[in-house]
Image: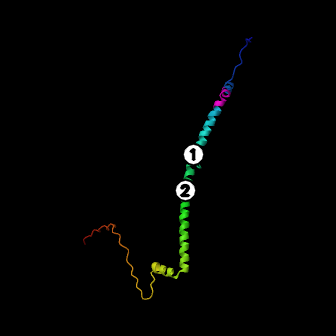
Amino acid sequence: MSTGGPKPKITLKARVGGFLFRIRRRIATALAVVLAVFFGYHVVVGRNGVSAYEQKRVEDGELRRQMESLEQENDRLKDHVEHLKSDPDAIEREARERLHYARQGEVIYTLNAPHNTNRTPAPAVPQTRK
């Protein structure tokens, strides 16, 4: 029982719409894959990604070691200050070593620092005849 009349014309817009409707799952899957790749790249290489995280961890470790070293030096210097405050012999020793103080009647001899023998000699200046 077919009608012998003409078939209705399908427009291009209807054809494209029908095609997209049939492959909508493929389009959605492809879009999801593209987004997953984009976000995965951003997580690994991005501004706050894994590589930046590793750099921050290394920097954190270095700063912690530096802090520990400075705290130890600070403790050592505090002990030295306390020692200087309480021990008159320590004060005298510091005055003699750093300031070259001497007691009455003592003579202090100081030696010059050794000359650097690796220096290159100055170039000779040519003499001009008069």
Quadrant location of the C terminus? Answer: bottom left
What residue is rendered at 54% in x and 66% in y?
70
Q: Position of residue 128 (x, y in %)?
A: 26, 70
* Among the two numbered marks 1 and 2 on one chain, the one whose residue lies closer to the N terminus: 1
- Answer whether residue 129 is magenta in the image: no
Q: Which of these two is toward me, 28 or 63? A: 63
Q: Judge by depth and name the residue closer to the eye, 83 or 47.
A: 83
Q: Secondary structure at mark 2?
A: helix
Q: Is residue 108 above or below residue 5?
A: below
Magenta range is 19-26
Image coords of residue 14 (percent x, y): 69, 25
Looking at the rendered structure, which numbered label has been put on residue 44? 1
Say which of 16 and 37 sits in front: 37
Q: Amino acid at mark 1?
A: Val
Q: Which residue is mark 2?
A: 59
Q: CA distance from mark 1 to mark 2?
A: 19 Å
For the point 56% across and 73% down, the residue is: 78
Q: Position of residue 3 (x, y in %)?
A: 74, 12
Quarter of the figure with the N terminus: top right
Q: Residues within 10 Å of mark 1 (few under 14, many from 20)?
A: some
